[in-house]
Amino acid sequence: MASGRARRDFFDARASDWEASCYPEEVRGRLLELLPCFDLTPGARVLDVGTGPGVLIPYLRRAVGPAGRVVAFDLSLPMARKAREKPLSPRDLVLQADGHRLPFRAAVFDRVICFAAFPHFDDPALALAEMARVLRPGGRLVIAHLLSREELTRHHGGHEAVADDILPPPALMGELFARAGLEPPSIEDRPGRYLASALKRGMPLSDESGRI
């Protein structure tokens, strides 16, 4: 299994051209079809987990509108720097952070979206627990890819640094969601799409302070 350092070097080295090479027009079309699954609403506070070069940021920004807030992070500093080049509102924030130790208070985000990133965590259970911790009760967590689980395994297999980075099988994914305090996930796994989505258990909160 590749080390965390090898994985980070892999992404650091590809930050400058990742978006251009991985998200041509045809792929963007499929990404647009995926966006409604995020269940975004105007005014929502959204966390973009493992943002990479910020591919999702423009779409999230439009969806949440002027009253909303987009917070995005990536472990790779070069990726986070590219993400900061995206159009942001004064309320938005992009930073380098570790998904296993999120620098946010609990129950602050209405949506937590982990797009094209979940297999790359060294400890998936801890990363998912952290995502759930910062999500409001009643909020939605989404893990999404533009490849099926099988397609993603083959894709990562072509690169030594990420060859072992796979999505958990459905039963294990359900167990991870449950342990994190989430409802049983709805899982869609088909060619060109993987989507695991669930609400956080508990009554919605009314805190509108905006502090993270």
Image (cartoon, rainbow, N blue to C red):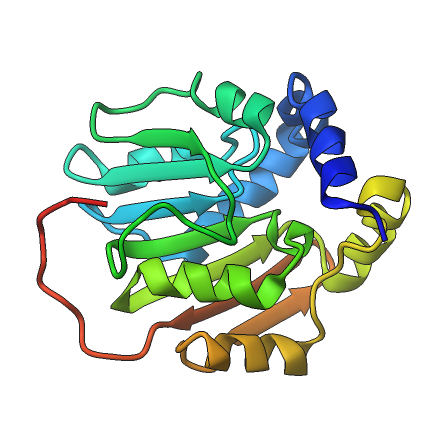
- Please state the horizontal and vertical placement of residue 28, each as a whole percent of the image: 58, 35
Question: Residue 171 sits in which quadrant?
Answer: bottom right
- Asked if residue 191 is positioned above or below residue 66 in the image, the reply reads below
Q: At 49% from the left edge and 30% from the top edge, which residue is drawn?
A: 54
Question: Residue 141 sits in which quadrant?
Answer: bottom left
Relative to 126, is 164 on the left or the right? right
Q: At 20% from the left edge and 45% from the top edge, which residue is drawn?
A: 42
- Please state the horizontal and vertical placement of residue 147, each as a whole percent of the image: 71, 53
Q: At 45% from the left edge and 37% from the top edge, which residue is drawn?
A: 73
Relative to 151, is 102 on the left or the right? left
- Asked if residue 96 is positioned above or below residue 130 in the image, the reply reads above
Relative to 81, is 40 on the left or the right? left
- Please state the horizontal and vertical placement of residue 22, each as a whole percent of the image: 70, 31
Q: Camera-side residue: 148 or 173?
A: 173
> Residue 16, can we see it?
yes
Question: Residue 43 sits in which quadrant?
Answer: top left
Q: Camera-side residue: 174 or 134?
A: 134
Quadrant, the C terminus: top left
- Please state the horizontal and vertical placement of residue 126, each as a whole percent of the image: 53, 64
- Asked if residue 89 is positioned above or below residue 34 in the image, the reply reads above
> Residue 159, can we see it?
no
Q: Tally the marks.
A: 0
- Asked if residue 148 is positioned above or below residue 137 in the image, the reply reads above
Q: At 57% from the left edge and 68% from the top edge, which residue is drawn?
A: 125
Relative to 169, is 157 on the left or the right? right
